[in-house]
Image (tube, grey):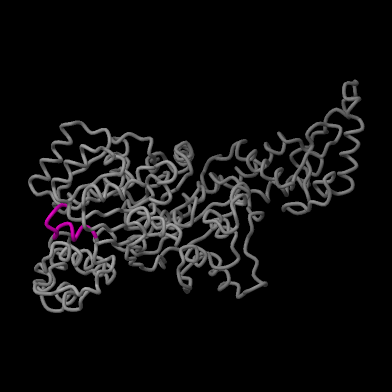
Amino acid sequence: MPSELRGKIFEAESTEADDPVLAVAKNVFGVSHLYPWQRLVIGNILDAAADSSGLASDLGRGATVPQDMTDAFCLGRQIVLLPTGAGKSMCFLLPAVMLPGPTLIFYPLLALMADQKRRLEQNGIECAVFRGGQSEAEREENFSLLKKGGKVILANPEVLQSQSLLARLKAFNISHIAIDEAHCVAEWGDTFRPAYLTLGKIIEQLGVPLVTAFTATASPTVLERVSQVLFGGRAHVVRGDSDRPNIRYSVVMAWAKKKAACRLAVTELKPMIIFCGTRAKSEDMARELSECVGADNVRFYHAGLSHEEKSAVEKWFFPKKDAILCCTCAFGMGVDKADIRTVVHLEASPTAESYIQEAGRGGRDKKMSKAILLWSKEDSDAYEKFAVASRERVLKKFAEAKSCRRQILLDALGGERTICAGCDICDAKKRTGKIGAAFNPPTVFDAADARLVHKFIRKNQNYYGREQVVERTMKKFNEMDRKIFGLNVWDSSDIDLILEQLEKSGSVYNAGLLWEGAMAAEREISTPLRRHPLCLHPRPLSSLLASWRGRLLAPFSSLAWPAFLRSAPQKTQSSSKEL
C-alpha cells in the first residue's frame, strides 16, 4: 500500500474526520479503537477497491498506485489468519458499510449466520440472508432489501449452487466477498461439503473484484489448499499470532469420559461448552448433566435441530452465566458468546486447526479461560492409526505430551516458538521444579478411574467374575462421587467401558479358572510386553497354571462337578482385599 494512501486512511491522531474507518467503527459499531492487524486488512480491502474502480476515493484522493504494487492484495485477494477473538468480523463489516455495493459473506453454519444477523441488527444494519428452505416470499423480501441499498448479504456455499440466484445477485454489483471460517474449504470441501470447492467458480461468475478469506487456524497445507481453490494459488496472506495467551490448555486422563465431564461441570467455571463427537453423544451428555446439575442449566445443540430449536437454544445460552451447552462442531465456529470460561472436549477434534478453533470459543472477553481435553485409552488407540506426520496425529501428540501443549498446537500451524502462558505441563514443571527426564507427566494409564478398577481386580486376583467386579467398583465410584453430586451417577455401562479398555490393553484378563469369568490383572496397568504369539500377556506363573488347568479340564465341563468347584465362593463386603 502506498505510504501516502496509508496515511490518509489510518491517520487517527487528530480527529475522527481524518480517520473515516475509525469514525465508522465508533458511530456504527460502537468500537473505540482498532487493532493494527484490523487496520492492515481493512486498508488492503479499501485500497484494492479504489484501485479496481480506478478511483482514489475519499480515502486517498489524488494518490496513485505504483505499477510495481500490482501484487495479489492490490487485486483484492487476501487470506487473513487471525486468532479467535481478534475481531475478524470487523475486518469485513467495516468495509461493508463504506464500499459502494453490498458485501457477500459466506458462512459454513446456519448458527453463524443467525448470530451475525442478530449482531448486525443490534447495530441498526439490516442484512439479506439466503439459505436453503426459504419460501419465494422470503427471497423476494431479501431482494427488496438489496434494492433499497442493503449493505450485507449472508449466505452459505450450497444456496449459491442455484444459477438463477447467482444471476439475480450479480445485478446488484457486489463490491466484496468475505469467506469466514475459510479452513472449511480444505477440511470439508473434499468430504461432505463439496459446494465449498465451487466457491472459486462462484466468485468468477459474480465478477466480484475483492475477495477475502478469513480463518483463525490453518496449517501450511490447509492454507495452500484454500489459496488454490479460491484464488488459483495466488493470494496475499495476512498472518496474525494464532496463540491465545488467556486460554490454559490441559488434558484429563479418563476412561469413562462422560463421568469426568460431569465432574468438570460441577468443579469448573461456567458458562461452559462441552464438545461432543456426534449428535447422539451431545444429547446423551446433556441428559446425564441434567441429572447432575439440573435441567435448567443444560441444553444440547447440533445440526439436526430445526431452525426454531436452534434459535431457542441460542437465546437461552447467550445471557446465562451458569449455562452448560453440549454441542457438536455445529456450534464451534464464530458464535460470539464472549464470557465462556471453560471449553471441554469429550472427544478430540480431528485436527489441530479444529481444536484451536473450538477451544477458542472460550475467553473471547480476554479474561482467562480453560480448554480441557478428555483423553482415554480408546482415543489413544484410535489416533495411533494415523500416520506419524499427519495433521490428525497432532492431537495424540498434544494429549500425551511431555512438553508444552501450547507449543505443539502452534507448531502444527507453522507458528513460531513462544513462552507458554499456561498449560498443565508447563505449570507442573514450574510447581515441581522438575525438567527434562526428571519430569514425568501423567500418561493415559494414569487415569484415576482405570487405576481404581485395575487395583480392585489386582487385590482380588482370580476371585471375582466380571459382573461382581462391575457391581463392586460401581459402588465404590458412587461412594466417592456422591460427595460431589449428592446422588449416584455411575452405572454398569461406565464400568463396562473401563473394563473393555483394560482388556484390550491386556492389563486385565479372564484367569481361566474352574469357575467361569474370574478376572485377574497384571502388576502394572500398562500395555503388556508382546514376547511370543502363544503368550500374548506375560502373567504371573500361578495365573498361567490356572489358565492351562482350565483348558485341560474343558472337555469334562459337562460332568456334574461338586458345587464348590462350579462357582467361586462369595466374599463378604468386609473382606480386607477389597478397596
Residue 121: x %, y % from top left: 17, 49
Left or right: residue 564 compared with residue 101 = right
Q: Position of residue 198 (x, y in %)?
A: 33, 46
Residue drawn at x 41%, y 49% as measured from the top left: 273
Q: Where is residue 326 drawn, in percent x and y?
A: 42, 44
**Image height of 60 relative to 302, above or below:** below
Left/right placement of residue 396 relative to residue 278 reads right
Pick the front one: 5 or 360: 5
User: In which image quadrant can residue 222 be found?
Assistant: bottom left
Q: Residue furthest front?
A: 67
Q: Main secondary structure of the magenta part?
A: helix
Magenta-highlighted residues: 92-102
* Image position of 277 with respect to 308: above or below: below
User: With respect to residue 420, does 514 lie above or below?
Assistant: above
Q: Residue at x 91, y 42 (%)?
A: 545
Q: Is 416 covered by the magenta stretch?
A: no
| Total numbered circles | 0
